[in-house]
Image: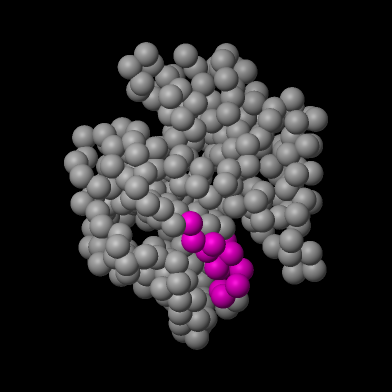
Amino acid sequence: MKIAAIDMGTNTTLLLVAEYTASGEIIPLQQAITTTRLGETNPQQPHLITPRAMQATLITLKNYLEICAQHRVKQVLIAATAPLRSKTNGAELVERIHRETGCSVQILSPPAEAELSYLGAISNKSHLPGLILVLDIGGGSSEIIIGEGKQIKQYVSLPIGAVNLTEKFIQSDPPLETELNQLRTTIQNTLKELIPANFRFDQVIGTAGTITSLAAIKSGLRQYQPELIDGQMLTRSAIETLFAEFCLKTLSQRQQIIGLEPERADIIIAGTALLLEILDWFKINRFIVSERCLRYGMIVKANT
């Protein structure tokens, strides 16, 4: 059965068209990613999705639905995360999408987002034994999930991500050390407040745009290739080296980094800082990269 999943996130809107087999395997047929920045903030109206982001998302969804039609997809799943939970005109966008496309959008609660992120990340890694820690660094929120098999044991949804941290702390180009210190302190305080002391795990998987971008940069990929990202091992030391490089470069210089999408160059510093603080908190030195995330989890959940 051909099925599609669309993830409307804080930074990007992503499409997965896949074949879901009788054995439960998800075979990707086509993927797309568009930077729509639903989570961007207008200082005069901070609680509203901006008209630009709303229009960009609508255009992107219509383009994705055309791709789905070309593949003769049987079912299209659309979900939204932090920006539609937090912005007061999120319901307006959902209504416009339904009116203009006929499609419904599910606004995911933090527990639902955590479950789908976890299910997606492990969807082709069921061979991993023991308790699995999944790190999902998002644009407006980040999920930290412990599970075993397909069952979640614990999770924490952090109200911080690459986009909102960038907007709050990174004002200079390149960033000042004072800005980076304030960024780190805020992340550390958030972790102290929200992460329980009893998190235990045997395996670590990292997923979503910041982490897959770091894997692409490390591999020197001029063109993003999911099959070369998935299953990579990233080390803390390699990430620290990349972070130091990012912090010394201007935005225009970061946009030239091989493996980094130019549209992500402005938020890669905050996203990487958040990842490093989480790794430090849990004393993690290395982890497996999963190119699969929430979209894959949507398909798994819809068929269970």
> Residue 239 appears at what percent x and percent y?
32, 63
Q: Residue at x 37, y 69 (%)?
A: 277
Residue 215 in percent (x, y) is at 34, 51
Q: Is residue 145 visible?
A: yes
- Based on the displayed image, in which of its 4 quarters is residue 97 positioned? top right
Q: Residue visible at 41% across and 73% down? A: 192
Please indicate whether residue 239 sits to the left or right of residue 304 in the image. left
Image side of residue 155 versus residue 125, left or right: right
Per the rendered image, the range of residues in magenta is: 157-170
Q: Is residue 150 magenta?
A: no
For the C terminus, give its image quadrant.
top left
Residue appearing at x 62%, y 30% in the figure: 64
User: Splitting the image into 4 quarters, where does residue 173 fall?
Assistant: bottom right
Observer-nearest residue: 57 or 254?
Answer: 57
Q: Where is residue 213 in the image (x, y as percent from the top left)?
A: 41, 52
Picture mark count:
0
Residue at x 23% of width, y 63% of height: 285
Q: Measured along the vertical axis of the image, is residue 158 above or below residue 15? A: below
Residue 97 appears left or right of 11: right
Question: Can residue 259 be seen from the camera position used here?
Answer: no
Where's residue 50, x and y in %? 76, 55
